[in-house]
Amino acid sequence: MFKYSLDIKDQVAVISFDHQGKPLNYFDSETLSLLEQILALAINTEDKGIILTSLSQNAFTTQNYEVLFKYTKEQLWESSKALQKVLRKLETCGKPVVAALNASTLGIGLEFALAAHYRIAYDSSQLQIGFPDIQLGILPLAGGANRLARKIGITASLPYLLEAQIATAVEAKEVGIIDQLVPDKTDILAAAKAWILNQPTSMQPWDHKNYKIPGGEVLSPQGIQLFSTTIASLRSKTWGNNEGAYAMLRSLYESLQMPPDRAFDVERRYFIYSLTHPNTYNLYHSLVKGKEKLVKLASQYCSKEKGSIKQVGIIGAGSIGASLAYCCAKAGIKVLLQDLNKELSEKGRNYTHELLYRQLIANKISQEKYLEIIQRIEIAEGYKGFENCEIVIETVFEEVSLKRQILKELSSFCSPQTVIISNTAALTYLELQQAVINSQSYLITHFFSPIEQTTLVEIATNDQVSNSTLARAIKFCQAIEKIPLVLPTAIPFFTFHLLLAYMQEGACLLEEGFPAALIENAAHLAGFENGPLATIDKFGLEQLTSILKQTTLNQAVTESFNSVIEKMYSAGRLGKKLGKGFYDYPETELPKLSPELKKLFPATQNSSAAPIVKQRLLLSVVIAALNRWNNQEKDSLWQADIASILGAGFPAFTGGVFNFVSRYGNNYFIESCNNLQQTYGNRFAVPQLFNLISN
Amino acid sequence: MREAYIYDAVRTPRGRGKPDGALYEVPPIQLVVQLLHALRERNNLDTNLVEDIILGCLTQINEQASDIAKLAGQTAGYPVNVPGVTLDRFCASGLESVNMAAAYVMSGQIDLIIAGGVESMSRARLGANGGSWYTEPAVAYPGHYIPQGVAADLIATLYGYSRKDVDEYAVLSHQRAAAAQRAGKYNKSIVPVKDVNGFTILDHDELVRPETTVEGLAKLKPAFEAVGKAGFDKVALQRYPELDEIHHVHHAGNSSGLADGAALVMIGSAQIAEKTGLKPRAKIRSFAVVGSEPTIMLTGPVPSSRKALERAGLSVENIDLFEVNEAFAAVVLYYMQEMNIPIEKVNVNGGAIALGHPIGATGAMTLGKLLDELEERNLQLGLCTLCVGGGMGITTIIERV
Ligand SMILES: CC(C)(COP(=O)(O)OP(=O)(O)OC[C@H]1O[C@@H](n2cnc3c(N)ncnc32)[C@H](O)[C@@H]1OP(=O)(O)O)[C@@H](O)C(=O)NCCC(=O)NCCS
C-alpha cells in the first residue's frame, strides 16, 4: 500500500502510494496505521525532507467510497479524524514535504498533495487534478477543500469545489494548485529532491502568523460579495437540488473563518453530513455502480466478438446522424455520411466542423487533430462505399414507410455480413424488420440527441437477431463511449415511454390551465433537466405525431395531449427545429417561452400549484416505468433506474424511477397515486409491477 | 390601558446619501444632537423628565455603532439619568422605535420618551454591516434571498406594473414633493443642520427633482437587471415558478434614493401634559408589525395595515391620509391596489422616491410628515406604513386630538 525508501546520497525519504489497481480505504485502521508508521519513520529519522509519489499509472491514490456507506456517522467522525491528524502531522512536521505528482491526482490524492508544502507535476494534458466526487455529493474529507481555498483563494477554488471542475496540469499550475511543472514524468523526482535540498524547513502558508486568504477573507467586502452571489448562482444553476454543493458552500463559509485545525473539523462535519445524505447514496449507486454494472453486462454480450469497427455508414444527416458522425470520427472510425442531397449531407458534416472548431479555438485540440478527425467523415453518393462498412445506421425521419424503403434498398446493397441498424425512439420493430432481407443482422438502437453529451443508448433485439450482430452493435457503442442497455424486443423503447408520459403530463397540465412557466419551472424544481414542453419541442411535433400514429401508442395518448398538439399545429409552432414551439428559439439568445402560449392556453392556476405539478410530473414517469418495465426479475430493476436517469432525464438524486418509490415509501406512493387517480383519471392507477418492487 | 400621545415631531432635512451630499460632512450623531436641542428649545422641555431615547438605525457600524441613542443624549447635554437604546428592524426601525415608545407609555412604565431614528448613508454605506441574511449559505440559500430592488421588480412582474406605470408614479412623487416644498409644508418639522459656527449646512430636502418627467425617466437603465441576471432572478422564479422571467422596471428615478438624516418624535402620557403644560398633537391609535414572504419581501404593509386597522376598530375608508413608504414605486402601487385606496389619499406630499430614504430615520420622519398634513388639512386619522427588508411590514395609525 505504501512504501518507504531512502535516497541515501541526498538523505531524502520517498513515500510511494501503491493501490495496486484497487481503491484504498483510508478510513480502515490498518491502512491508516501503516501510513502513520511510514510517516513516523520519515519524520523521525535524519532525512532532510519527504517526497510523496505514486507507483500507479492511472491515479496518485484513491479512496473506496462504497465501503464508507456502511459506516455509521460516529465511525466516520472517528476515522476521518484519524486521517485528518495524519495529514496535519505531515504538513506541520517541520521538514519540507513535496508531492511529486506522476499520475492524475483526484479526490483523496489531491488532499495528500495539498497537505504537502510543494507540488510538482509534469507537463501533460493527460494529468488531471480536482475533486470530481463533489458531483455525487461527496466532499473532501480531510481538509482538502480548506487547503485548496487557502492556497489559491476562495474565488479561484469554487469551480473545483462546487462544480467538480477538473484541471489539467498546466491549468493547475496557472491557478496555483501546482507549484512547478517539469517537462517529463521522469524529471519529477529529481526536481522534488532539488527543491527539498534548497529548503531547510517548511511551513504551510496558513500556519504563518499573518496569513490572509488570497483575494479576501470570508467576511471581507470581497468575500461577502462573493458568497452572496455564489449562493444565488448555485441555486439558480441547480434549482436547489444539489445538496452536496450546498453543503460544500456552507462548509467553506463557516470553516474558512477559523484557523486550520478548527476549520478541518468543520469540514469533516459537512463531509459526514453529505456522505450520509440519501441523495449521495442514490447518486453513487446509479451514476457510479449502476453504470459500472451496465458496462460489465454489455461486455458479456460481446466478449467473443473480435475485430474492431473501422468504417460506419450513416444515412440521414439530421441532428442524430450528424452527432453520430461526430462521435464516430472522434473515436477514430471512418464515416460515410449520406442524406437526400449533397447539401444536406454537408450540413451534417458541418456539425462536426463547428464542434471541433470551438475546441480548436479553446486550445482543446491541435490543428492536426482537427484535420485528422474532420477528414474521417466522407460524404457518400448514393450507397457507394456502404458495402465496405461493418455497420450501417439509418437515422432518417421517424416514419415507418420511409424507413422501410431505405432498409429495403440498403439490405439489397450491403453484404449479408453488414450489420444494419435503425435508430428510432418508438417505431415498431417487426414492421421495420420485415423490410430487411437478413433479419439476423438487423437491430434497432435509440440514441439520445446530442449523442456526444449523453452516455446511454438503448438497443433492442429479438430472437431472430444473431449473437454476433448484437455483439458488433455493442462493440460499436463502446467504441464511441456509449453505455448500451439491451432490451429484448422492448419497443417502443423503455425510456421513450417515460418521456412520452412526461411530455403528456406536461401537455395535460397546460390544457388544464397551469401556466407554461409553472410547468417548466416545477419540472426543474423537481430535478428534471428539461421541462416537458421543452422536451416536446426537442422531438418536434411532426416526429412526435408520426410516432404516435402507431396503434400501440395511440391508445396511451390522452385527449388533452391531442388537443395541445392540435393547437400548436394550427399556431404553426412545430418545435425547436423550426425555431418556434412552446419556446421561441432566437439565434443569438437563450430560448424563451413564447408569449403566444398565454393566448393559446389561458392560465387559471398560480404558484401555490407548484407542489402538485411537481408530483404529477414525477409520478407520471414512475407509473409509466412500472407499466412498461417488462422484466419481472427483481434484480433487473436497477437497469430501469439508470435508464430513467440517463435516458429520460429523471432526477439523478432520486436514484431512478424505482428507487424513488422505495425512498418515499410504499404508502406515500399508493396514497399519492390514489389521490391523483381520483382527480385526474386512471392513468394514475397503481400499476401491477408495484407489487414486485414493494416487497 | 393608557393613551400614548405625540407631543412633537422634528427632523433634519434629507441630504443626498453620497459623498457629494450636503450632510456627508456631518457625523450622524450630530444630526441627532441638533434635533435633541431643537426638541428641548421648541418645547421648553425639562429634559430631566425624559425617561429613554430609542433610535432606529440600520447600519450600526463605526460611528453609528455602540448605541448611538445613548451617546446622543449625553452629547446633547441631556442629564446623565437619560438612557438610550438603538434598534434595527431594517427600514421599519424609525417607526418601530415610535411604536415601542408608545408601548412603554401605554403600559404605564414610562411617561415621557423620545423615539426616532438616524442614518447617514453617505458615511455608513448601505450593506457595510453585512449579515447572514445574504452572505451565510445556511440562511440565504434556503431563504431564497434576493436583493430588495429585484424583489420590487418581482412585485411589478407579478402584478403587471409596466415601466410606464412605475415611472408615472415616480413623477407624481417628485411633483408632489416639489409642490410641498414650494408651499413650505415641510417647514413645520424641519430643523436645519448647522455647523459649529451656526452656519446652515442644509435646510431643505436636497434630492427632490421638480423637473422629473416620464420621458426623462424612460432614459434611465434598470438598476437591478445585472444583479438579477447574475442569478437572483432565477432564485425569485424558484419561489414564484408561475413566472417565466422578471421584468426589471426599477431604476434610480423610481426607487428611493440613498439619503442622510434623522428624526425624533416625542411621546408621552396624558400626565405629561398636566405636569408640563405641553399640548398633545395626536394619539397613537394602534400599531402592528408582521412578517411576510421573505423573497418578495416588500408586500408586508398590506397585512400589517389590516392588522393595525382591525386592532383600532377602523376600516380603510375611515383613514383620511396614508403614508406608504416609497421604497420602490411598485410597493406603493401594490398597496393601493390591494387595499383599494385612491391615489389622492396616499403620499400627498411626495415620498422617498423624491425625498430619499435614510433607512433608520424614515419611519419617524414619515409619521411627522403625516401629522403635519393632517393638521394642515384639519383631518383626523392617518396611517403610516413601511415595507421592511427580510419580509416584514409595519403600520402605525394616529388620530389628532
Ligand atoms: C436605485 C439605486 C441603486 C440608484 O443608485 P445610483 O445609481 O447611485 O443613483 P443616482 O442618484 O446616482 O442616479 C443615477 C442616475 O439616475 C439619474 N436620476 C435619478 N433620479 C432621476 C430623476 N428623477 N430624473 C432624471 N434622472 C434621474 C441621476 O441623475 C443619475 O444620472 P447620471 O448617472 O447621469 O448622473 C439606489 O438609489 C438604491 O439602491 N436605492 C434603493 C435603496 C434601498 O434599497 N433602500 C431600502 C429599501 S427596502
Image: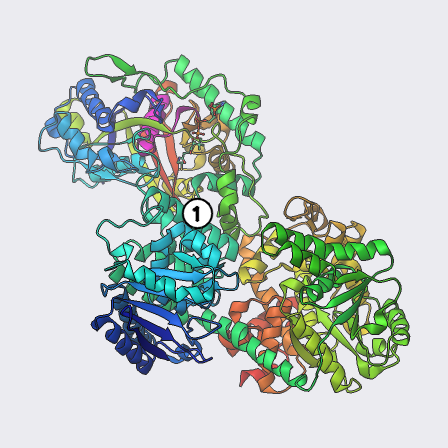
In magenta, the rendered stretch is B354-374
Residue at the outermost left position = B80
Report whether residue A490 is seen.
Answer: no
Q: Residues within 10 Å of mark 1 (few under 14, many from 20)?
A: some
Q: Quadrant of ligand 1?
A: top left
Q: In which quarter of the image is residue A394?
A: bottom right
Residue at 68 percent across and 66 percent down: it is A448
Report whether residue B303 is seen.
Answer: yes
Q: Where is residue A50 in the image (x, y as percent from the top left)?
A: 30, 68
Residue A176 falls within the magenta-colored stretch: no
Q: Is residue B389 above or below residue A164?
A: above
Q: In this view, does B213 lie above or below A248?
A: above
In the rendered structure, the residue with mark 1 lies on which chain?
A
Between A513 and A567, the residue placed more toward the observer is A567
> Tag 1: residue type?
Thr
Between B328 and A82, the residue placed more toward the observer is A82
Question: Disc 1 marks which residue?
Answer: A229
Q: Where is residue A99 in the image (x, y as percent from the top left)?
A: 36, 65
State left or right for residue A195 relative to residue A673: left
Between B83 and A680, the residue placed more toward the observer is B83
Secondary structure mostly seen in the magenta stretch: helix
Secondary structure type for disc 1:
helix
Residue at 88 percent across and 80 percent down: it is A437
Q: Is residue A324 above or below residue A433?
A: above
State left or right for residue A345 relative to residue A508: right
Residue at the outermost front position = A9
Label 1 lies in ligand 1 vicinity (Cβ under 8 Å): no
Residue at 64 percent across and 51 percent down: it is A358
Between A386 and B1, the residue placed more toward the observer is A386
Residue B364 falls within the magenta-colored stretch: yes
